[in-house]
Image (tube, rainbow, N blue to C red):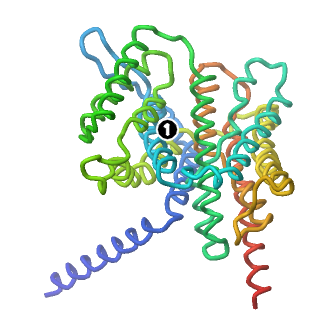
Amino acid sequence: MSEEKEKNRFDEVIDEVQDVVSDFLKREAAPGILLIVATVLALIVANSPLDVYYNKLISLPVQISAGDWAIDKPLLLWINDGLMAVFFFLVGLELKREVCEGELSNPKDIVLPATGAIGGMAVPALIYVFFNWGNSTAMAGWAIPAGTDIAFALGILALLGSRVPASLKVFLVTLAIIDDIGAIVIIALFYTSNITETALIVAAVCLAILWRMNRKNVVDIPAYILVGLVLWVAMLKSGVHATLAGVVLAAMIPMRDKKRPSYSPVLHLEHSLNSSVSFAILPLFAFANAGIGFGNIAPEGIFHPVTFGIFLGLVVGKQVGVFGFCFLLVKLKLASLPKDLNLMHIYGCSLICGVGFTMSLFIGSLAFEETGVNLIFDERVGILAGSVVSAILGYMVLYWVGKTKKTSKA
């Protein structure tokens, strides 16, 4: 009898844990919280006796081969080049949905966030360049502070709840999507080298096949994925960064089935991938890339122009760029704020845009880690410090604005 009671109690505990986990995963802030947990865990491991195993894990050689053909990379690059291609595929699907049927389908609605996004990319990059001008190696990281981590940013807004208007989320999402477009263009133009013509021709053939499938209203998703895998391998071998294959593939997925307009392959894939990317791929990327061993960093590395340029680019450059450009546009009456937003909301949002994290880490890996250059600085210090400070400041400003608004209503 006691064994049966213990079994029932055990089942009850399991059910309670499942309910707690299920409730957590349904929360809008969950992806951002998981990123924080993965980052903190990576930092703890990298600064403990387990750091040896951490370094062995991310440098573990992983090879896929067939005859003379092979892809041989450490686990870290499989995550950055392979799993992040899935992330960029999801970003591409979101872009297509927004352009075809969402916030980016009406040009009038995107003027303000698009201008903020341009300022939020340009000013941080200029600040970084100012501190690193003349150092050709350091200049490779000019785009690092230009990124915005949409998962973290939306997580902060979710923590604020009803203190921020719903339209601020729309503004932030639109701005972050345009920021992602800018990051994709930057990666394609400035972080591509050693072009291999044969592989590029194969990629072009794959692109032509995907375009033809789209035109013929092919909605068989596995067929697109199969061609997309060949496209990814071709881009990986061509010298064009492989993650761009995800964006190209997403652009070729039909928005609607012409025979069944109610069915959207884009929305179907987006919903299918969202949980995997948010709760597995991005936390894994954060864990693999955020493990900074502070014991190996000299004081001159912390105050190095690269670290300093990234930090100020995220904390100062983002708020000056996003808020400054939006402020000028509104004052010149070239655009107007949504009815339930004021300039303080935009300022708080501009601070949150300084949370570069995932995109900044990714661009940083392209600029420095993958080049094999031995540098005295660690750009991740600037990214983490700038993102944390931006998150705290943005949360405080928006919390204060929401509290002031509620007090005035009372």
Position above or below: 170 against 194 = below
Q: Residue at x 77, y 67 (%)?
A: 342
Q: Nearer the viewer, residue 141 or 327?
A: 327
Position above or below: 158 against 66 = below
Residue topped by disc 1: 54
Q: In the figure, is residue 10 to the left or right of 289?
A: left
Tell me residue 117's x, y (percent): 69, 46
Tell me residue 393's x, y (percent): 76, 60
Within the image, what quadrant is residue 302 found in? top right
Q: Nearer the viewer, residue 75 or 114?
A: 114
Residue type at the position of mark 1: Tyr
Tell me residue 2's x, y (percent): 17, 86
Q: In the figure, is residue 262 to the left or right of 173?
A: left
Q: In the figure, is residue 6 to the left or right of 55?
A: left
Q: Which quadrant does the C terminus fall into? A: bottom right
Q: Residue at x 69, y 42 (%)?
A: 383
Position above or below: 75 against 1 = above
Q: Residue at x 49, y 42 (%)?
A: 285
How many numbered tags mark residues here? 1
Residue extending furthest toward the bottom: 410
Q: Nearer the viewer, residue 312 or 332?
A: 332
Q: Residues within 10 Å of mark 1 (few under 14, many from 20)?
A: some
Tell me residue 17's x, y (percent): 36, 72
Q: Nearer the viewer, residue 218 or 123?
A: 218
